[in-house]
Image: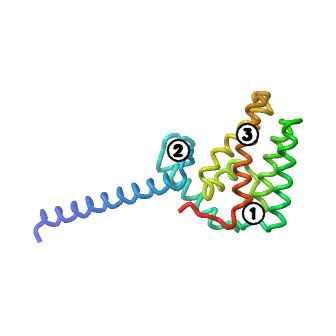
């Protein structure tokens, strides 16, 4: 066979392979952007603008969460946690600072009861982003306000926003019947 024909076939095959890889990456990026919403952009910022690194991290999160035994709460757990949340909200009027710490601890307790590991905030937020991508931004914001508050950099209005963020995630975790994978 003519060497030019062989070279043309090889080059053609490489072009087809490159196009296929590019299309696959584009589809993966679109899926991750759709599934993770604002968390996709957060991951890109964390990866200093490297989309490939961010996407790899998001895919690792998905695989990690798939291995977790995430389960719904039993009705009695749900009722107890709902009562605990009412107490957190009631304390906000008299002691907003304390209620933020209690809200953060209660969210972590609900997560633990559902089967999420809770040792590290970033890990918790990452795990949550797989199944609750729209709420994890509220969680990050509430946590950031709580941290700012410990430094004396958050006012009562900030604390109110934090409680609202915690409440949105808390309510979603409480009512979730079974894991809803983002993809």
Marker disc for residue 114: 1
Query: Which sits in the foreground, 92 or 68?
Result: 92
Q: Nearer the viewer, mark 3 or mark 2?
A: 3
Residue at the far bottom: name it.
1
Residue 179 image offset from top left, x and y in percent: 65, 65
Name the residue at 51% across, 49% down: 53
Q: Nearer the viewer, mark 3 or mark 1?
A: 3
Marker disc for residue 162: 3
How far apart in space, not on screen, are marks 1 and 2 (Cα)?
A: 27 Å
Secondary structure under tag 2 reads helix
Asked whether, in this view, residue 80 is left or right of residue 1, the answer is right
Marker disc for residue 41: 2
Nearer the N terminus, badge 3 or badge 1?
A: 1
* Neighbour tally class for label 1: few under 14, some 14-19, many 20 plus, Cα within 10 Å: many
Q: Toward which corner of the image does residue 172 lie, by quadrant?
A: bottom right
How far apart in space, not on screen, are marks 3 and 2 (Cα)?
A: 21 Å
Marker disc for residue 20: none
Which quadrant does the N terminus fall into? bottom left
Name the residue at 81% across, 51% down: 106
């Amino acid at each position: 066979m003519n060497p030019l024909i062989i070279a043309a076939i090889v080059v053609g095959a490489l072009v087809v392979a490159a196009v296929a890889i590019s299309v696959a990456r584009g589809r993966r990026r679109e899926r991750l952007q759709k599934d993770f919403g604002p968390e996709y952009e957060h991951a890109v910022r964390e990866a200093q603008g490297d989309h490939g690194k961010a996407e790899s991290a998001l895919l690792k999160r998905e695989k990690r969460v798939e291995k977790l035994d995430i389960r719904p709460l039993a009705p009695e757990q749900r009722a107890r946690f709902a009562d605990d949340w009412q107490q957190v909200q009631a304390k906000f009027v008299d002691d907003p600072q304390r209620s933020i710490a209690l809200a953060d601890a209660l969210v972590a307790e609900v997560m633990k009861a559902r089967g999420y590991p809770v040792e590290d905030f970033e890990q918790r937020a990452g795990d949550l982003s797989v199944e609750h991508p729209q709420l994890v931004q509220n969680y990050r914001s509430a946590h950031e306000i709580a941290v700012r508050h410990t430094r004396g950099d958050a006012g009562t209005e900030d604390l109110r926003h934090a409680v609202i963020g915690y409440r949105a995630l808390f309510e979603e975790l409480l009512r979730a019947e079974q894991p809803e994978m983002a993809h």
